[in-house]
Amino acid sequence: MTGEYETFENIYLDLSRVGGRCRFGASGMGWKPNPKGANAKDLKDQNMELWTLEAHEFIQAHWSRASKGYELKVFTRAMGIVQLDGFEQDDLDRVREVVKRFYNINVEHKEHALKGWNWGKAEFSKHELHFNVANKPAFEIPYSEVSNLNLAGKAEVAVEFASGDGKKKKNKATAGVDQLVEMRFFVPGTVKKGDGEDGDDASEDGEKGEEMQAANLFYDTLKEKAEIGEVAGVTYATFLDILFLTPRGRYDIDMYENSFRLRGKTYDYKIQYDHVKKFFLLPKPDDVHMMAVIGLEPPLRQGQTRYPFLVMQFKKEEDMEFDLNITEEVLKQKYDGRLQMHYESAAHQVVSSIFKGLTGKRITQPSRDFSSHHQQSGVKCSNKANEGHLFFLDKAFLFVPKPAVYMSFDNVQHVTLSRVGGSVSASRTFDMTVTLKDGQGEYQFNNINREEQQPLEAFLKTKNLRIKNEMVEEVW
């Protein structure tokens, strides 16, 4: 050991898959990945490079067991929590001496609860949520890893974790091969306002002593600590009471610089614009409504249900006059030509135009090569037990609203037209089955009006799609 610095090998920074060298010195500490034996993809995906922390950032340090041996957890002033995993048990004395000498901080040894109980006490500290069992920490959740919260029931809170958006969160959860995406807390009973964590007084809009659901207090406290909603910044636009067909319900939409938020009566969602991969504007074949469809990757999650598409519905005749909450300077610098200060048009046009300007995704509309028997852009049909509409785009089929199915023509092996059961000549409807390439499966759309057969076949031929027609006597 030298007087200038102390070095430890094979240390993993913030749950990284790549080990490296950790060095402590009087001016601070640094960590550098070791490329030897490391996967090149891991180095690239996790943006592994030299990382440093200045000495004045150190506030507190804990030592405990961890996945790769022993971990030093450093609490900082402005960089949240730093986790250094991979120490040996015999390193404790060296680490304590180094941290005390360089940063004048005592390393606290934390023993984790090993009872295996799932019932305990939740405590909110400055940087993380502690779940304690028998007065010992069972696990901790850094606020920086919480991406979304929902009240899943009267006494249940669903906590969703960062999934790789890379904007405001550290995304430690995405460092490993497997990742935890959601955790649910059952918080029964009621509490009094003012009896919250950290000795907080009653809220300004509520009297001290007023009872509220314990789950609501847990939700509100974690939402404030994790800065859910606030981290997005200034709201550029807010649309109230928008009808969604998928997920079903009415939501308020808050649009920020890098993300948008859906606020409903039960669920709230925050979605990064980077996750928006497609945007469609579709006229519903009833001459009354328009549907705006947003394609997401990764999909929106609600418990075990995934929603790869969000489907909004507007009335065609509904007009909207709207002013963006944005300065002309920002409008010119960041969105020159993509957004405007004032909108006055049909509601679906206003919402889709603002989405287009903020996400940078073009609006896809139905193909001009298809016109149904009733001069519509789509046909009514069913996918299994779900009724909906099948739209014909220039490069894909799209079934909405639920479950939304997108089938690119590049992945279509052939399309089969048939009528299962009954007399073909007497049937007023037919079925269409889209078989995908490379064994990706097939989708069957039932009960399409017989009048749509001719325009549908003509469209398939213009797109050079292989047709298998089982509605004639000679099967192809």
Image (tube, helix red, strand yellow):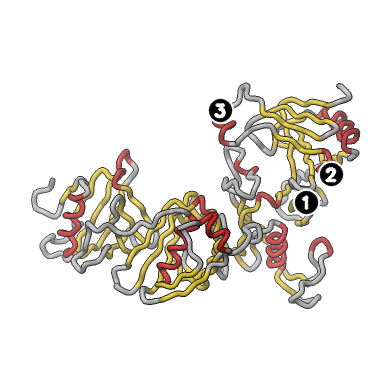
Task: Please name the residue that numbered disc 1 is placed on.
Answer: 133
Q: Residue 120 is drawn in which quadrant?
A: bottom right
Marks 2 and 1 sit apart, C-alpha to C-alpha, by 22 Å
Q: How many residues crowd mark 2 within 10 Å: few (<14), some (14–19), many (20+)?
A: some
Q: What element carries label 1?
A: strand
Q: How many residues crowd mark 1 within 10 Å: few (<14), some (14–19), many (20+)?
A: many
Above or below 357: residue 95: above
Residue 261 appears in the picture as rendered: no
The foreground one among 99 and 384 is 99
Task: Please name the residue that numbered disc 2 is placed on.
Answer: 60
Task: Please name the residue that numbered disc 3 is placed on.
Answer: 40
Give the x, y percent position of residue 234.
Answer: 62, 62
Which amino acid lies under the numbered mark 3 shown in the image of this protein? Ala
Marks 3 and 1 sit apart, C-alpha to C-alpha, by 40 Å
Q: Residue 76 is drawn in which quadrant?
A: top right
Would you say 22 lies left or right of 467 here? right
Above or below 84: residue 121: below
Residue 98 appears in the picture as rendered: yes
Residue in view at x 89 percent, y 31 percent: 97
The foreground one among 135 and 443 is 443
Give the x, y percent position of residue 230.
Answer: 66, 61
Would you say 63 lies left or right of 182 here? right
Q: Are marks 2 and 1 in contact (CB under 8 Å)?
A: no
